[in-house]
Image (cartoon, rainbow, N blue to C red):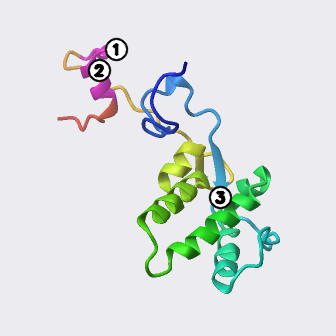
Amino acid sequence: MGRGGHAHSGPPPDPNALRNERNDVAGWKVLPATGRPGPAPDWPLTPAGNRESWHWTRLWKTPQATQWEVLGQQVEVAIYVRRLVEVEQPGATASLGNHVLRLAEGLGLTIPGLLRNRWQIGSQQAAPVKQPQVPTGTDGSAPAASSARGRLLRAVPSDGS
């Protein structure tokens, strides 16, 4: 039996984490900041209303849409759009709002969703991962990386004071 609680329990992955020896950097996809070119695909559900059509067209121009197209997520995006339009209406329930937020996260439309999908928005070239500089201890030697003090000194750059 697996460990942990729910799916997505724990913090989302971080490409700039200090523990890069876990190879968290591998598998990150850099999405083009310019978004997905071209027209939106055909709407896959029953006929869309004006507001649904507007959101559909807008969302298919986002960087995340490049991955939805690759993964064939047209129906998932359409369901998100339909529920988003419903939650915009007066009297929408909190549970519907929570559902919309979960759908948005799954599609990478939120910061946690981007991180969980291991997507970064940027140029076509992968951004270099920041490597912390290892400051020297007071005696000029590098502190042990396995100690809490050593990890702290690696994470916080020394300003010379």
Say whether residue 112 is left or right of residue 76. left
Q: Position of residue 6 (x, y in %)?
A: 48, 35
Q: Which residue is mark 1?
A: 146
Which residue is at 70% across, 80% downward? 53
Magenta stretch, residue numbers: 140-154
- Residue nearest the observer in this picture, 33 or 88: 88
Q: Marks 1 and 2: CB-CB under 8 Å?
A: yes
* Residue picked out by circle 3: 64
Three-letter amino acid code of the residue under disc 3: Gln
Q: Which one is closest to the eye, mark 3 or mark 2?
A: 3
- 147 falls in the magenta region: yes
Residue 61 lies left or right of residue 93; in this view the side is: right
User: For the residue marked with disc 1, what is the amino acid?
Assistant: Ser
Q: Between tags 1 and 3, which lies in front?
A: 3
State the residue position of label 2: 150
Residue 35 in sight here: no
Q: Is residue 123 left or right of residue 97?
A: right
Q: Is residue 47 above or below residue 6?
A: below
The reply to whether residue 84 is visible in this rendering is yes
**Label 2, residues with CA under 10 Å away: few <14, some 14-19, many ≥20:** some
Element marked by disc 1: loop
Q: What is the spatial separation of the Cα atoms under label 1 and label 3, in whole angstroms?
A: 38 Å
Q: Secondary structure at mark 3?
A: loop
Quarter of the figure with residue 46: bottom right
The total of numbered circles placed on residues is 3
Q: Residue at x 43, y 38 (%)?
A: 11
